[in-house]
Amino acid sequence: MGRLRCNKDTARTCILSKRWRDIWTSFSSLVFDQRKIIGQLSGLKTSSEVQTRIQRNMKMLANYVDETLHRHVELDLAVTLDLHKGYSLPQCVLAARTITALRLRVNEQMIENMIRACPLLEDFRLIYATGLKVFKVSNLAKLKRIDLHTCSELKEVNLQAPNLETFCYVVLKYRSYKIDLSTCNALKSLTLEDATLKDESFQNHLSCFPALEKLVLSKCNFLKNITISSYKVKILILRECKQLEEADIISPNLLSFEYKGEKMPFTSLNPSSLKEAKLYFKPSGQGESRLRNEDNHTPCRGLKLVVRSDKNIVIYERPKGIFLPQVYDLKLDVVKSSVDLEDLLDYILRTWRPLTLSSLSTSRSRLPKLVCKKLITREKDPSCCTYNASGDKCWRHF
């Protein structure tokens, strides 16, 4: 059941046999959404009919929730609220010592009560928590992940979480705040989307995480000159940091790199272990740009460069000095040659379906022969298209 796409598919298993009739109700992933009940009122003409239907549907929902929760210990509620009223969650929920993950709209006092009552909490996410100004966490030895997303009034974050592995902080407004992550020495994944983050603050954060393996910086518009030096970092993503002028990247074990912006701000980037890189360039109004080995220090040997421009694709099998035309949203993917050439070709043509495919390679290249072979050997009644939805065809028959 865990491999099925949605709860509806899980519920459909009840028709298999009497034994399967009630098994689906014990499925561990549950969503009770009142909004779906409210949305089933189309076609009703009078307000009395609407009210009668709502009452009947809500009674059915209540019975369904009661019966299902007898078999479960996790809970996900989506409740439609009146703008002038709140929803008071029963305190017995916060006192459930077996809770490992909980999503709520909360205030500081509720968070303190929950931390005291739920010592086994592993995953803590606050999303659109309006009114929350201070977020403090301590005495949660099993806590592995914290997400703070668009908590518009948050001014202070203090985490005493030595076993925390993932921290994500997204703020959309320009406002001052204070974050203390100094005790989170086990952090492996850090995501920051913060328009007010400055160079010094970022470097101070980074120095606290010796075990960091994944770093994501998105829309950090105050960053100008940063240094990322770590033997542990394997995944690095820099997206739309508009003021970034210089990034000194010293990460010899980097496996995956992604950058989105107007220019290449890297003074050094020499990852000998790099397996993939994705570069998305937006027009800067400076005409033609050029990607050279001297610019990005990416070793050519063993790499292939795939350039996407509009609906045309060029594959450079031995990238050296490459001139890139000034086009909208130019995208480049660099993949290590250990990626099977046939798999790479199938992925490119299946995913992007370009109008034109060009290959810049030596006479010994397998790529042109591989394309020709795949087209010649395609079946008249293709079995390769049967997995596609809505009668869509694979690239060989498109």
Image (spheres, rainbow, N blue to C red):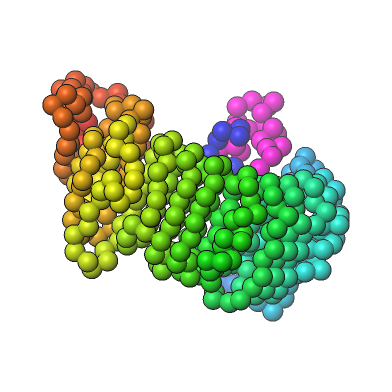
Q: Residue at image x 29%, y 27%?
A: 342
- Give x and y (percent) for residue 102: 72, 53
Nearest the eye: 171 or 38: 171
- Give x and y (percent) for residue 205: 61, 59
Left/right placement of residue 174 relative to residue 376 reads right
Q: Residue at image x 77%, y 40%?
A: 71
- Give x and y (percent) for residue 346: 29, 32
215 is higher (above) or lower (below) than 221:
above
In which image quadrant can residue 302 be found?
A: top left
Q: Which residues are magenta?
A: 9-31
Q: Where's the C terminus, which quadrant?
A: top left
Q: Residue at image x 27%, y 54%?
A: 330
- Give x and y (percent) for residue 116: 86, 57
156 is higher (above) or lower (below) than 100:
below
Q: Residue at image x 77%, y 69%?
A: 108
Residue 22 colored in magenta in the image: yes
Residue 57 colored in magenta in the image: no
Left/right placement of residue 234 relative to residue 357 reads right
Nearest the eye: 240 or 376: 240
Left/right placement of residue 397 relative to residue 29 reads left
Left/right placement of residue 177 relative to residue 173 reads right
Nearest the eye: 365 or 56: 365
